[in-house]
Image: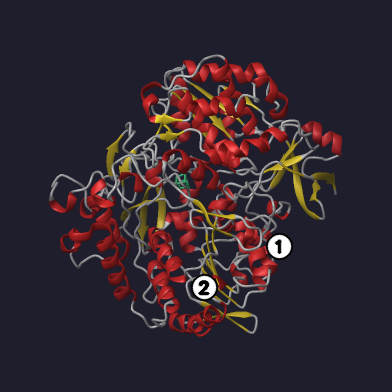
Amino acid sequence: MTHTIHHRICPLCEACCGLELKVQDNKVISIRGHDADVFSAGYICPKGVALADLHEDPDRLRTPLIKRNGEFVEASWDEAFQEIEARLPAIRAQHGRDAVGIAVGNPAAHKIGLLMYFGRLARALGSKNVFSSSTLDQMPKQLASGLMFGHWLSIAIPDIARCDYLLLLGANPLASNGSMWTVPDFKGKAKALQARGGELVVIDPRRSETAAMANAHHFIRPGADVFLLLGLVHTLFDEKLVRLGPVAGLVNGVDEVAVAVAPFSAEAVAERCAIDASTIRGIARKLASTQRAAVYGRIGTCTQQYGTLASWLVDVLNVLTGHLDLPGGAMFSQAAAFASNTSSSSQTGTVPGVGRGITTGRHNSRVSGAPEIYGELPMTCLSEEIETPGVGQIKALITVGTNPVLSSPNGARVGHALDQLDFMVSLDIYLNETTRHADVILPGLSPLESMHYDVAFPQLSWRNHARYSEPVFERPGTQLHEWEILLKLSAIIQGKGADADPGALDDEHFADDTRRQFGDQAPAVMQAVGHQLRGPDRLLDVALRSGPYGDAFGAKPDGLNLAKVKASSASGGIDLGELAPRLPGMLRTPSGKVELAPPMLLADLSRVRDDLKLPTPDMVIIGRRDVRSNNSWMHNLPILAKGPFRCTALVHPSDAQRLGLSDGALARIANGTRSIEAQVQVSSDMMPGVVSLPHGWGHSLPGTRLRLAAERPGANLNTLLDENLRDPLSGNAVLSGVAVVMQAV
Ligand code: SF4
């Protein structure tokens, strides 16, 4: 039998590589990078090939499960929705809207149906108890960017194709291919940067894969990035190196920043961050003197108690050295669809470049008083909101593609809390450490059974593009699309019943959305879109056509629409060009300017001042990203599980000697009364006094169905982390730099 060729954007990480799949007899027989892909040009990492394993995985759920007498039994979709209807609305009616919480994980970002329809379910619930993995690793970057540029997804990324000096902090894009920065084949692009005489400089407590290829690498004390960044900004003012360049008239707050950083000279911060003052001053001078340069900070800079400050200071450096919004500097992608910072004034009623900005703290979490952020509460508040009696206590929970028992600090407490719920529904493809607590599990589709268009990542992409993926396989007859599942759940919540037709619900929502977005033009828009499209496809067509490259529903015949983007799939999508300057039009701040000195951030510097002389613990722990892992369920995919065991505790030889640890032996790592045992790997790549363990492991809990992962379960880093430690501004969990005690077992 002959094979067929299919093209699919890889949904397994933020790099969004274009893949080419060969299918025969309804099976994937090979996966390779799609050479013609306009964005990733044939690049693929080992995870991309694992998409076939994910599709075939016998542990992947294909039928709803209902827990009866403590055991999961297979059920029909009708039975599953009837069970939910019988139990969920009653809890909401008795205890109020906030009694039903909802939590979503990062797989939602890789499935347009989940991402676009999760909001519909959250709105139907009307609960303040909304949680997501954003407060585990990225909210600081979103908050800092929102305060400076006016929208949560207006995030400046390095224009690596033209950059000549790239300073990376707490990031390992060689393993990740970017995070909050979509940059497939980072290695190739970094090598090109070096080949044209540019420099890559990495700041990290571990000599990561990226650091190993860098022109320079500097160890830094975990959690001390804010001190280094303040020292760099201080040096710019101190040595009169501040040059704003073309954006000079568009920036508020330069003088306020100069005053705020006055206590943080390079000499004052050097000991705290363990980087000497001359190095700090040298980096600042190099940044200022290089015409095309950019600073990028990622997970290490976010997952710490000063996450928002560190994220802010990264862009303060980009602004003060004249590199914001210029080729080769820190720029803003222009997405073809769904980007709030591209919407036109006629749609929003605002002047381009001016907006409402962002707001936080519209309500607070009930127990800890943590402020709401981007419509949600910190994931680390979930347990206490379930455990603590009172009005607003979470009695029921809906989880969507999230596994906080493994991915959130003190996961054991999360697990115990989930057991106290009156009812729990999970939309997930696995029976994992979190969904084992559910009463009903609704399985999503394999990525190969869904159409896809990336909603968020084109807003963070190294180059502008529009690419669409058709489903590779028909979905199984009885299976629902995720967007249909979410609409059915919304209907149950709204009292429309478990039998509600998702297609009709979708039509209602679409009509409402169109009226809201287009006002008087709505009938014409609906007519232009027609009746053929449903679900995410219809939303995508409207977004593309009304977007910055769109056909304006026929008024611009050369513009984009869904049909054109779909038709480009085999030829690798549509290239929309290199990043181009977007200021001031993309700003959405009330002033119409870049806000360099948001008062909330300046006020938070008092904490940093107090910590400047804080003593350093003997040993602190950090996480680690591996090219073969991203989400916890990837440990269940044969091709990724092969090879040497990766859940090892990396320690420097001097620490190994001091603590009597030997390579390959077990060590106990403890934080107070909580401890784990992990296999030691002695490595001079580590900074002395720092141990590194990857996250997402710990597959030894009973009642899961991740059989391959359970064979080599690994230790759960999050067992050691404190759920009460958060960046107070963003609510983000502190995952890096937590003090631990390590000893040989
Ligand atoms: S880097 Fe790997 S996992 Fe990420 S999108 Fe590309 S192929 Fe997929």
* Residue type, label 2: Arg
Q: Which of 385 and 404 is in front in this view?
A: 385
Residue 411 x, y percent position in the rendering:
68, 60
Q: Residue at x 53, y 32 (%)?
A: 314
Q: What secondary structure is marked by label 2?
A: helix
Residue 361 x, y percent position in the rendering:
54, 54
User: In the picture, residue 603 is in which quadrant?
Assistant: top right
Q: Which of 81 and 475 is in front in this view?
A: 81
Residue 184 seen in the figure? no
Q: Which mark is residue 429?
A: none
In the rendered view, tell whether residue 169 sits above or below residue 6. Answer: above
* Residue type, label 1: Ala
Q: Which of 565 and 37 is in front in this view?
A: 565
Q: Residue at x 31, y 44 (%)?
A: 342
Mark 2 Cβ inside 8 Å of ligand 1: no
Residue 132 seen in the figure? yes
Q: Residue 97 carries which label?
A: 2
Q: Distance between the residues labelled 2 and 1?
A: 27 Å
- Badge 1, how many Cα within 10 Å: few under 14, some, many 20+? some
User: In the picture, residue 699 is in which quadrant?
Assistant: bottom right
Q: Which of 500 and 264 is in front in this view?
A: 264
In the rendered view, tell whether residue 425 sits above or below residue 403. Answer: below
Which residue is under mark 1? 412
Disc with the residue nearer the chain's start (2 vs 1): 2
